[in-house]
Amino acid sequence: MGCVTADEQVTTDAAGRRQRAAVIFNPTKQGVDTLRTAVAAAEARQHFAPSLWIETTADDPGKGMAHEALDARVDLVIAAGGDGTVRSVAAGLRGSGVPLGLVPIGTGNLFARNLDIPVNDQDDAVVLAFSGMDRAVDVIAADVVRPDGGEETHVSLVMAGIGIDAAMISNTNDDLKKRVGWLAYVDAGLRAIPASKPYRVTHRVDMGRHHRSKVSSILVANLGYLPGNIELIPDAEIDDGRLDVVVLQPRNLLGWLLIWRKVTWENRVLRKSALGRQFLDLTGGKRRSEIVYLRGRSVELEIEGAAEEFEIDGDEFGLVVSARFTVDPAALIVRVPR
């Protein structure tokens, strides 16, 4: 994908018109005053007009605010928040062509981490939002059906899942999450795995053949890296116009241990060298069925029996009985490092 720098945009803008950004932020988060100072400094450096500041609400974490920013004809939208805020703002910007800058404030920040955006330095993130390169990335659209028959559409930037991953997220202790961040998910996972029960699901990729499987979870992803040196999907690319599907189907505790070894050792270390790949071939690593990878432009899931927990980008989204995921290629422009 082609990239252009924000500096180039400034010099080629309409004659005499100063560009303007909108900052969408959660007023309950700490550090807003520091954020305002950093934004003011970036505005001066890039010759931007004073930014439009828009607060999120409990009922709308960003999508409506993104529409408000677009109506104001801003040239850049900055989302200051965690994955939930970023996802909601992205939903409002999807297909608009207006770039999204990220200032991570939260625990996971998986989208920002996968794009090499600073997650622990607010000032650097603001500088990048104003002066980074524009990169077109894919968005996942999720059409889900609730147990009562209601239908909803959501977007995902990182990954969505049905099964134990969603149960784990719903069981995460909020106080622990505030104290230790993403490590709280490990605690929830250790509690969720022993109590988890596989479910049966019928799935197909790209309108192909139906497959009936007994799974612990199915993940549909746009990105492959998780915190803690976990490389869940080695071949996932954010701008390849494809979905990466992960089917987790361990039969017992040993199966979970094999999955853990694969995402923390085999994917991250062994696959990186010819010798490591040869070792995997000799030991049957590529033929094991505890974790199966699929790719395509769409995937349909029909759950048999009771509804299952659903999550998007690390946030719980209730119960669903079926879902259809499709990729919207290059639907979002994001400011990334040069």
Image (tube, helix red, strand yellow):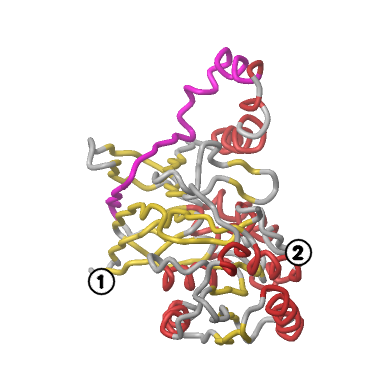
The image position of residue 96, as x and y in percent, is 40, 69
Amino acid type, label 1: Gly
The image position of residue 115, as x and y in percent, is 61, 53
Q: Which residue is most to the front?
A: 15
| Residue that appears at 48% across and 66% down | 316
Q: Is residue 210 left or right of residue 272?
A: left
Q: Nearer the viewer, residue 117 or 272?
A: 117
Amino acid type, label 2: Asn
Q: Which residue bears the numbered disc 2?
A: 120
Residue 262 is tagged as none
Q: In the rendered image of this protein, does residue 229 appear above or below residue 155?
A: above
Q: In the rendered image of this protein, does residue 49 appear above or below residue 120?
A: below
Q: Secondary structure at mark 1?
A: loop
Range drawn in magenta: 276-305
Q: Which residue bears the numbered disc 1?
A: 150
Whether 45 is among the magenta residues is no
Q: Which residue is most to the top?
A: 282
